[in-house]
Image (cartoon, rainbow, N blue to C red):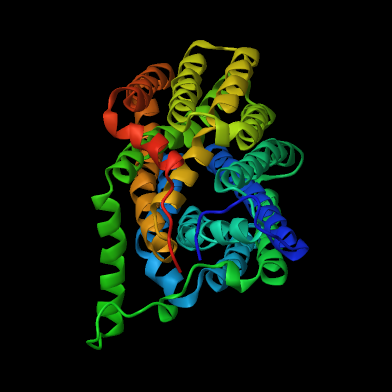
Amino acid sequence: MNAVVEASQPVDHRSRVALWAYLLAEVVSTTGTRMSMVAIPWFVLTTTGSAATTGVVAFAETLPYVVVLALGGPVVDRFGAWRVAIVAGITAAALVGAVPALYAAGALHLGVLVVLVATVGAVRGLETSTYVLLPGLAEKAAMPLTRATGLHDGMNRTAGMLGVPLAGVLIAVSSAPAVLVVDAASFLVAALLLGLLVPRTSQPPTRDDEVALDDVPQSRVRAYVAELREGFGFLMRDRMLVAIAVLVLVTNLLDQAYSAVMVPVWVHDELGSPLALGLIGGVFGVGAVVGSSVFAWLGPRLPRRRSFAWGFLVGGAPRFVVLALAVVLPPVLAVSLVAGLAVGAINPALAATEYERIPRHLQARVIGALAAVAMAGIPVGGLLGGLAVERLGLDVALLVFGGVYLATTLAPFVFPVWREMDRTAENPVTVDS
């Protein structure tokens, strides 16, 4: 069976329902996660008054997330992406729900919060289990992969558009821990949608379904290490995937400093209202949803590399510069809207390239390895952002980080390896199964 989807192949109603149930589950869980990404930094900043402490809490969540991304691929392969996604969602709901429960009981000290967010981060690191369900669902629904990734990104952008401003409103009228109640419920609802409406057959083959790597019996540890090495080995042999990982590594570091530290500090110092915090993220989300929708429609006919490169260039560094120069909200909102429109092409282009280049039975391992490298800058980003703001001042830190962002996003215009992104789109990898 060929993994490249043809638009003319037959499709039944249940396959379409399964695909849209999957997308809805992603919207629900991502909305809750985006809300907590606003609520937790604001809670720490307002209770401690320290940008550095805010960065430390962000580090505590994101480091386990990256570690599990790197090491969790063989686990997903062994137990099956569908099952892991459901169990991870239920576990995350319980852990996130513990935060407001402990707060209400007067037992939510900083150390307890750090432990909880670190554990939640580790569970979220298994998100490759949901990510690798998409190609199978798109194939069964007879949807071109570029369009499916565009829809997926657009729905996630919608979640950001809804989650961030909703968090700002809820924090203003209630409290940051109350936002986490909604986040916990979102994980549970998403797990139910996957369990009830998305078929297990949409997942890639589990390890037990594959032919063994050799005929020599291996211990579970040796087998795990071999599978992990196979994923990282495939990644390191593909220059295009390495280029993607390095670029996203740097930009994720800078984006984490921007969203987890610099924007909350700017809003706190200049405006003093969490409503503005939600509004900045919401306007960016509106632009990103529109941009993703346009790319989902036009993506199969657009040059992938140029769309991706210009999206990163316009959607990256200008956000830092305007925040350094502005003392009122409107210019920040205007730049956030344009940046959101531009970044709508980034994730669909990346996802389609990865799916096309990586065989399905290796996707959990290779995409997990790639995501781990790409996300490795996120824990450091929160720490560096907090330290830079305290040592250099907010404005100087913003200009320095924005300059690095600009230099990084020029890479797809300069280095020849990025031309392979268009070649992949013209001649996608096919996998026989």
- The picture quadrant where one finds residue 209 is bottom left
Total marks shown come to: 0
Above-or-below relation of 49 to 266: below
Above-or-below relation of 296 to 390: below
Picture coordinates of residue 114, whole percent (x, y): 46, 55
Picture coordinates of residue 41, whole percent (x, y): 54, 41
Above-or-below relation of 300 to 186: above
* Camera-side residue of 395 and 236: 236
In this orientation, does residue 112 appear? no
* Camera-side residue of 49 and 157: 157
Left or right: residue 274 versus residue 211 is: right
Q: Residue furthest front?
A: 8
Q: In percent of the image, x 26 and y 65: which residue is there?
A: 229
Q: In percent of the image, x 56 and y 66: which residue is there?
A: 85
Q: Residue furthest left?
A: 216
Left or right: residue 195 versus residue 410 is: right
Left or right: residue 174 versus residue 301 is: right
Left or right: residue 27 versus residue 50 is: right
- The picture quadrant where one finds residue 10 is bottom right
Above-or-below relation of 82 to 298: below
